[in-house]
Amino acid sequence: MKAKDRILKAADRVFGEMGFDAATVRRIAQISKTNKALIHYHFGSKEGLFAGVLEYYFNSLAQTLHGAIISNGPLSERMIRLFDRYLDFLEKNRNFVHIIHREIAGGKQKEKVIAHMTPLFQFVLQGIREAYPKTKAGDLSAEQLLISAYGMIIIYFTCSGIVKNLIGSDPLSPKNLKIRRQHLYQMFAMIIRNLNLADKNAAKLLRRL
């Protein structure tokens, strides 16, 4: 593994465990078996290193979500595939959750994180509106649906310590992750049924006009 890649991997670990504020370039250098001078050469500063970690994660996530949307099948199925792949991403990248939500909660890198998240949210919003035109406004607006879906998915990971007490076992074990995924499928299926029903009712009204 190249030195730059080792540095990014070490930074991911340190930022995930300690947060941006508590993390030090010295600790990252120790874990990556490099030195501070080499880290500054590649990334300029701790802020630059954090930006590199964000860039890696969000580039990977963007490719994952775009790939789900442009794949074959009805748009509604592709939207389900999109959320499925998002779950895969979170399960494989545990540090991502800690890094992102620690900063959003008031970290110094909050604005950088939001700047990366916003285009992805807008992309998913557009996909929901295209799949279900009724979500452009009303009680089932795309914005509210996305907020609800995001909350249902992400809270399970960010509050895993609380969830552990609720279910009495490790929420991030393969067994419990599978149970959680199946529950989310059922929740999304109910939402989709409501959206399809809204579309059918709208179609009936149009035929009466």
Image (cartoon, rainbow, N blue to C red):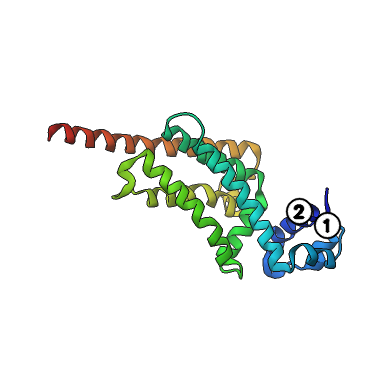
Mark found first going from the N terminus, 2 or 1: 2
Residue 124 in the image: state x and y as whole percent. 46, 47
Whether residue 169 is visible to the viewer of this picture, yes or no, is no
User: Which quadrant does the C terminus fall into?
Assistant: top left
Tell me if residue 154 comes above or below residue 130 in the rendering.
Answer: below
Q: Which mark is residue 32?
A: 1
**Left-right relation of 30 to 60:** right
Indicate the amino acid at tag 2: Lys
196 and 57: which one is in front? 57
Q: Residue at x 70, y 61 (%)?
A: 15
Badge 1 density bin: few <14, some 14–19, many ≥20, Cα 10 Å: some
Residue 163 in the image: state x and y as whole percent. 57, 50
Tell me if residue 134 comes above or below residue 34 in the rendering.
Answer: above
The residue that mark 2 highlights is 9
Q: Residue at x 59, y 44 (%)?
A: 63
Badge 2 marks a residue whose secondary structure is: helix
Report which quarter residue 45 is drawn in: bottom right
Give yes or no for contact between labels 2 and 1 (Cβ–Cβ under 8 Å). yes
Badge 2 density bin: few <14, some 14–19, many ≥20, Cα 10 Å: some
Indicate the amino acid at tag 1: Ser
Tell me if residue 88 comes above or below residue 141 in the rendering.
Answer: above
Residue 77 in the image: state x and y as whole percent. 45, 32
